[in-house]
Amino acid sequence: MRTLSAVLALMALTGCSSASAPPPSVMLEKPSAIVSLNPCLDAMLLETADPAQIAALSHYSRDAASSSIPQSVARRFDVTGGTAEEVVALSPDLVVAGSFIAPATQAALERLGMRVETFGIARTVGRSVEQVRRVGEVTGNASAAERLAGRIERAVEDAAPPAGAKKPSAVLWQPGGIVPGEEALVSELLTIAGFENHAAARGLGQADYLSLEEVLADPPDLLLIAGEETGQEHPVLDKLPNTRRARFDPSLLYCGGPTIPAALERLKTIRGELLAERGA
């Protein structure tokens, strides 16, 4: 490992490279070893790629607090901490990463002839579907990716309430007591499922803190609780007669892709239960 580190350092100083990363248009062969450095890309790979193609996932997927996939599934694969040394040791022919990958890490991998494909944050369902298709394209699994894209699009159609249906107000109370902003993907999912974003109506934005006192002062029709803070489990919430509470799995918050159908199905179920209670 020391030798490998020394080689990478020397190449960084001299600007030498053993091979130049060919442009994507030249890379026609299906990658045989893929390393992912992003938890959302981990989830997409597991849904679209051949398991034998996956050399390693990101270490985030081994942490239940940041993973969108079951821990039992994540443990079947190797993981890396995202360093160039760890990635090089696996000899991948494709690395997929978020757009915030360290420039030095990306440069080192590309100087060693590895193809690095980066993906930004998908803040809408449409953008997430585009990412799914692009993941399928770069990994040589376009058909599987198209099937996943189709599942997402059907989930959006199935979750939509009838035209003119009542829109219950909802607050998604996330871990740490914060709420999502209007531009967050999960906020779009709330809208698709027929809810009105109560936090946004109160003027709260991305990652703004919502206190227990604020909830009690202006309660929504639905309080989706994804955290385990003291206030989020306080007995006083039982005294809100017109507010339904429901748990929302935090793993449905982090990513798009295959998470979208599961999140929409959960929201659709909760909405049905809420309206049934009120005879709507």
Image (cartoon, helix red, strand yellow):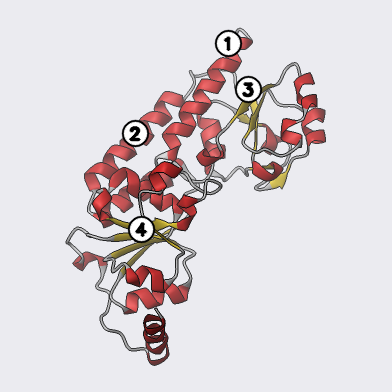
Q: Are marks 3 and 1 in contact (CB under 8 Å)?
A: no
Residue of label 1: 276
The answer to whether one can see residue 239 in this image is: yes
Q: Are marks 2 and 4 in contact (CB under 8 Å)?
A: no
Labelled disc at residue 151:
2
Q: Amino acid at mark 2?
A: Arg
Horizontal side of residue 2 vs 182, given as left or right: left
Label pair 1/2, CB-CB below 8 angstroms: no
Kind of element beneath mark 1:
helix
- Quarter location, residue 29: bottom left
Left or right relative to 86: residue 24: left
Q: Report, in whole angstroms, how far the alpha carbon at label 1 lies from the one at label 2.
A: 27 Å
Tell me the amino acid under the disc marked 3: Pro
Q: For the residue labelled by badge 3, is the local secondary structure a helix, a strand or a loop?
A: loop
Residue 74 in the image: state x and y as whole percent: 41, 48
Residues 277 and 77: in front is 77
User: Residue 131 vs residue 137: left or right?
Assistant: right
Disc assigned to residue 168? 3
Q: Residue at x 69, y 45 (%)?
A: 176
Question: Which one is closest to the eye, mark 2 or mark 4?
Answer: 4
Q: Are marks 1 and 4 in contact (CB under 8 Å)?
A: no
User: Residue 80: percent from the left, percent from the top?
Assistant: 42, 62
Picture quadrant where residue 210 is located: top right
State the residue at coordinates (75%, 27%): 219
Q: Which residue is mark 4?
A: 56
Q: Is residue 69 among what the camera can see?
A: no
Judge by depth and name the residue closer to the eye, 196 or 10. 10
